[in-house]
Amino acid sequence: MSRKAKKGASSLSYYLQKTYWKIITLKPSTILLASLAIATSVFLLGGGIYDILEQPIIAFVSGGRVIPYYPQALNEQLLGESIASMILYSLGILGLILMYQSTKYAYSPREAFTTLLIGLLLLLIGWIIVEFFLFPSTISPFQ
C-alpha cells in the first residue's frame, strides 16, 4: 500500500465521508420502522410521558388493603391505569394487524374468517374496556 493511500485512509475527512455515506445509504427494514412507530404511539397515547414526569403512585395501600381511588382532576391518575391503557391499545392494534393479515388467506376461507374474527374480537375487547376507563358511569353495570 502506498504512502498516499495510507495517509488518505487514516485521515479524519476520509473516515467522516465514509461514515456519512453509510448513514445516508442505510435502509432499515419497514417492519422495524412500523414496530417502532406503533410502540411510540402506544407509549404516548397510554400516558408514558406523564408517568415519567409526574411519577404517579401505584396504588393506595392502608392497613394491608388496597383502597380504590378515583381522581377528581384531569392531572391525576394511577400508574396502573396508564399501564392498563397501554396494554389495551396494544390489544386493539394487534386486532387490527390480525384483521389485515386475514386478507393473505384468500385461498383458505376458513382460516381467513377465523383470523378476521379473532382480530375483530381483540379490537372490540380493547375498545370496550378503554371506553369503560374513559366513561365509567355510562357503561357501568352497577348503576
Image (spheres, helix red, strand yellow):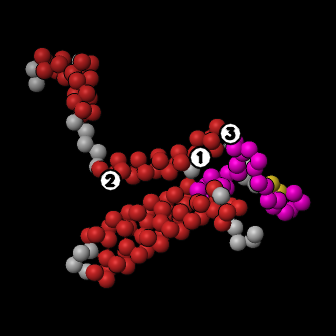
Q: Of the residues under marks 2 and 1, which one precedes in the sequence? A: 2
In 3D space, how far apart are the residues under numbered discs 2 and 3 (Cα atoms)?
A: 33 Å
Front residue of 139/123: it is 139
Q: Amino acid at mark 1?
A: Gly
Instruction: Please name the amino acid that badge 2 sits on.
Output: Ile
Determine the image quadrant of residue 96: bottom left
Tell me the number on the disc at residue 31: 2
- In the figure, is residue 44 to the left or right of 29? right
Residue receiving disc 3: 54
Residue 23: percent from left, percent from top = 27, 33
Q: CA distance from mark 2 to mark 1?
A: 24 Å
In primary-sequence order, the first of circles 2 and 3 is 2
Asked if 10 appears above or below 100 in the picture, the reply is above
Is disc 1 placed on a helix, strand or loop?
Answer: loop
Residue at the image position 22 percent from the left and 30 percent from the top: 21
60 relative to 38 in the view: left or right: right
Kindly tell me whether residue 35 is visible in this rendering.
yes
Residue 15 appears in the rendering: no
For the point 67% across and 51% down, the residue is: 79
| Residue depicted at 50% across the width and 68% down the height | 124
Q: Position of residue 114 (x, y in %)?
A: 37, 79
Type of the residue with mark 3: Glu
- The residue labelled by disc 1 is 47
